[in-house]
Image (cartoon, rainbow, N blue to C red):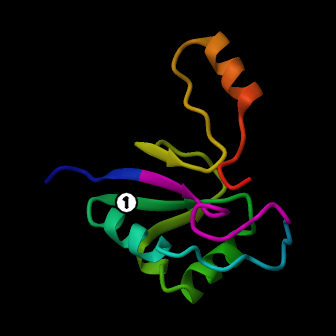
Amino acid sequence: MQKRKTIMIDLDRVLNTYEGKYDENKLPKIRLGAREFVEELNKDYDLILFTTRNNLKATKWLIENKMDKYFKNVTNVKIPAYIYLDDRAIKFSGDYQNTIKQIEDFKVYWK
């Protein structure tokens, strides 16, 4: 049997409705379609929640939103993975000048 690839998924604004107003004690509501998205990915991939938030609070959020069974772990450590899914990511293509332009022009999709 072939080993499943790992996808690390960010919590804020990928799975929840975070809008940039950080509150360490309150995690935003689940995004519409997030549970179904995670359920679909889990059929073929191992999922790890990647967040800079408190791991226990993030785990509790997963449990409250009935998604804990789809994730192997919750971490703030970047581990080897097939894909990193994040709303604030730029893919490095090997071209530094293009990367600088992408950084300068970067806008989060939700603003």
| Image coordinates for residue 98, horizontal then vertical, percent | 62, 15
Write the residue at 77% across / 26% down.
Answer: 104
The residue tagged with tag 1: helix, strand or loop?
strand
Q: Position of residue 16 (x, y in %)?
A: 63, 70
Amino acid at the residue labelled 1:
Asp
Viewer-closest of 89 and 109 = 109
Q: Main secondary structure of the magenta part?
A: loop
**Residue placed most toward the observer, 60 or 92:** 92
Task: Residue 110: give x, y in percent of width and height.
Answer: 68, 55
Q: Outermost residue, left direction? A: 1
* Membership of 92 in magenta stretch: no
Along the viewing direction, whichever of 74 and 7 lies nearer the viewer: 7
Left or right, residue 102 beside residue 85? right
Magenta span of residues: 7-21
Please tell me which residue is depicted at 46% across the width and 73% down the height of the picture: 33
The relative height of residue 49 versus residue 28 in the rendered view (above or below) is above
According to the picture, the residue beneath numbered tag 1 turns out to be: 46
The correct choice, above or below, for 8 with respect to 102 in the image is: below
Indicate the position of residue 23 as horizontal and vertical percent values.
86, 72
